Amino acid sequence: MAYLLTVDGLQTQLDVDKLTLPDLQRMVSGYVEIVRASAERVLIVDEEGRLKDKPLNVHASRLAGQVIVGDVIVFLADEFKRWDDRLGGEEDAL
């Protein structure tokens, strides 16, 4: 189950089968960066979030064990792999 995790801690479930790379970019308000939070979770964050002085995302930071700013998308690792494979490996372009 992928979900958008906002800096306010709100979670909105996402339909992974309909997500595109432009959708991810829109949700994080920028170019995406992949953060492997653990063996089980992958976070999609704004690559330039710190440069943009986005607010701390406390919940995402706890998941990742590092400072994460801005709204993020949380994927289960296997779900992210299926999403990436469906799009033809767009991860390489991220």
Image (tube, helix red, strand yellow):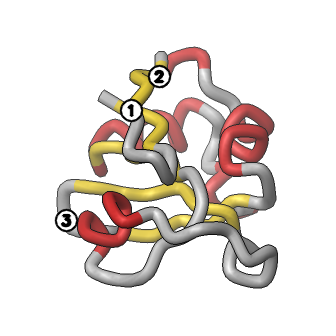
In depth, the one of 18 and 12 nearer the eye is 12
Q: Is residue 74 left or right of residue 85?
A: left
Q: How far apart are marks 3 and 1 (CA)?
A: 21 Å
In depth, the one of 90 and 24 nearer the eye is 24
- For residue 11, the mark is 1
Q: How far apart are marks 3 and 2 (CA)?
A: 21 Å
In depth, the one of 61 and 88 nearer the eye is 61
Percent across and percent down for residue 40 are: 19, 56
- For residue 14, the mark is 2
Residue depicted at x 35% and y 71%? 61
N-term mark: 3 or 2: 2
Quadrant for the N terminus, please. Answer: top left
Q: Is mark 1 on a helix, strand or loop?
A: strand
Q: Name the residue under label 3.
A: 39
Badge 2 density bin: few <14, some 14–19, many ≥20, Cα 10 Å: some
Q: Quadrant of residue 69?
A: bottom right
Q: Looking at the image, is 82 positioned above or below residue 35?
A: above
